[in-house]
Image: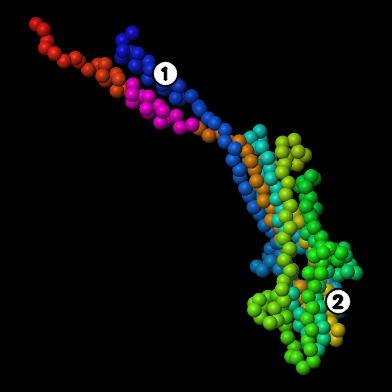
C-alpha cells in the first residue's frame, strides 16, 4: 500500500474514533434556600403584641418556604439533604408610668400549650422528617423569655426597650433562639420520590407565641415584638455526564498526518537523467 493511502486511512480512522461520544460521570451538588417569616406582608416581619393591663394575648403565624424539585434524570439523583433552620426573636418593651414593678413575658405558666413554638403545618410534604420545637414553661430556655423593670418613687416614667441601642441605660436584651434540624434521603426512602419533578415543594410551618404583662400598680404597659422565621435548604447530589475534549486530540492527530503526507509527496533532489 502506498504511503499516501496509508496516511489517508489513518486520518479516516482518527476521524471515526474522535467522533464517538466520549463522556465521564461527575458527581455534583445543587443547593436551594428559601426563607419565610410569620408576617411577609410587613416589611419588618414582626408580630406586635402590646398589653396595657394585666392580661395575656396570643398570636399565630404561617410560613411557607418553597423549593424546586429535581428536574433531571431520576436515576441520576443520588441523595436529597434537607435542612431546616428556625429563628425566634423577641423584642421587649416595658413602660412603667407610676412607681411599680412591671413584667412582660413570652411564656405563660398557666397556659403551657400557648408557649412559643414553630412546628410543621398542615400539608407538610415529608412523613419521615417533621422538625419542630416548643419552649414550654419547664424548658430551661423559658426564664429567658421574661423581662422585668422597676420604676422607683421619684423617677419619671420611662420606656425600656430591646430596640434601643445597647449602650442606652434603658436597653433590654432581646431573646434569640435558632435551632436547626436536618436529614438525608436516599433512593428507596419513602419521601425521596417527592423531590422528583418540575414543580415546587411547599414546606408550611406554623409559629405561635404568647405575651403576658403584669404591673404591681396596674398603671403601665408592655409588649413583646416577636419575629419567627423558617429557612429550608435543599441540596441535590446527582450524577452528570460531561463530554471529553476530543476536538483537541483530533486536531493533533490530523495535523501530524497531513504533515507526513506532504513529506511523502515531496520530489527527491538530484539531476534528471537524459
Within 10 Å of disc 2 (Cα), the crowding (few <14, some 14-19, many 20+) is few
How many marks do you count on the picture?
2
Q: Residue furthest right?
A: 110
SS at mark 1? helix
Q: Position of residue 160 (x, y in %)?
A: 73, 80
Residue 13 circle label:
1
Question: Which of the image's four quarters has the C terminus?
Answer: top left
Residue at 72% across, 49% down: 182
Magenta segment includes 3: no
Q: Residue furthest front?
A: 140
Q: Position of residue 139 (x, y in %)?
A: 84, 63
Of labels 1 and 2, earlier in sequence is 1
Q: CA distance from mark 1 to mark 2?
A: 89 Å
Q: Quadrant of residue 106?
A: bottom right
Region in magenta:
244-257
Residue wearing tag 2: 55
Q: Position of residue 217 (x, y in %)?
A: 85, 86
Amino acid at each position: 500500500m502506498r504511503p499516501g493511502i496509508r496516511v489517508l486511512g489513518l486520518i479516516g480512522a482518527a476521524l471515526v474514533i474522535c467522533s464517538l461520544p466520549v463522556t465521564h460521570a461527575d458527581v455534583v451538588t445543587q443547593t436551594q434556600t428559601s426563607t419565610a417569616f410569620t408576617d411577609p406582608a410587613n416589611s419588618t416581619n414582626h408580630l406586635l403584641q402590646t398589653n396595657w393591663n394585666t392580661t395575656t394575648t396570643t398570636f399565630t403565624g404561617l410560613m411557607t418556604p418553597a423549593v424546586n424539585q429535581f428536574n433531571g434524570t431520576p436515576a441520576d439523583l443520588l441523595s436529597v439533604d434537607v435542612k431546616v433552620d428556625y429563628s425566634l426573636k423577641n423584642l421587649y418593651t416595658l413602660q412603667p408610668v407610676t412607681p411599680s414593678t412591671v413584667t412582660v413575658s413570652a411564656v405563660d405558666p398557666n397556659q403551657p400549650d400557648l408557649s412559643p413554638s414553630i412546628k410543621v403545618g398542615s400539608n407538610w410534604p415529608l412523613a419521615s422528617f417533621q422538625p419542630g420545637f416548643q419552649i414550654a414553661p419547664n424548658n430551661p430556655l423559658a426564664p429567658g423569655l421574661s423581662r422585668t423593670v422597676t420604676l422607683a418613687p421619684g423617677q419619671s416614667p420611662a420606656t425600656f426597650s430591646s430596640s434601643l441601642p445597647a449602650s442606652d441605660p434603658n436597653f433590654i436584651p432581646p431573646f434569640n433562639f435558632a435551632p436547626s434540624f436536618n436529614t438525608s434521603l436516599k433512593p428507596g426512602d419513602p419521601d425521596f420520590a417527592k423531590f422528583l419533578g418540575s414543580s415546587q415543594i411547599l414546606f408550611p410551618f406554623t409559629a405561635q407565641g404568647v405575651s403576658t404583662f403584669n404591673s404591681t400598680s396596674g398603671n403601665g404597659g408592655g409588649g413583646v415584638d416577636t419575629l419567627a422565621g423558617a429557612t429550608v435548604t435543599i441540596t441535590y447530589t446527582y450524577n452528570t455526564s460531561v463530554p471529553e475534549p476530543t476536538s483537541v486530540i483530533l486536531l493533533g492527530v490530523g495535523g501530524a498526518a497531513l504533515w507526513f503526507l506532504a513529506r511523502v509527496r515531496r520530489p527527491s533532489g538530484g539531476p534528471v537523467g537524459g
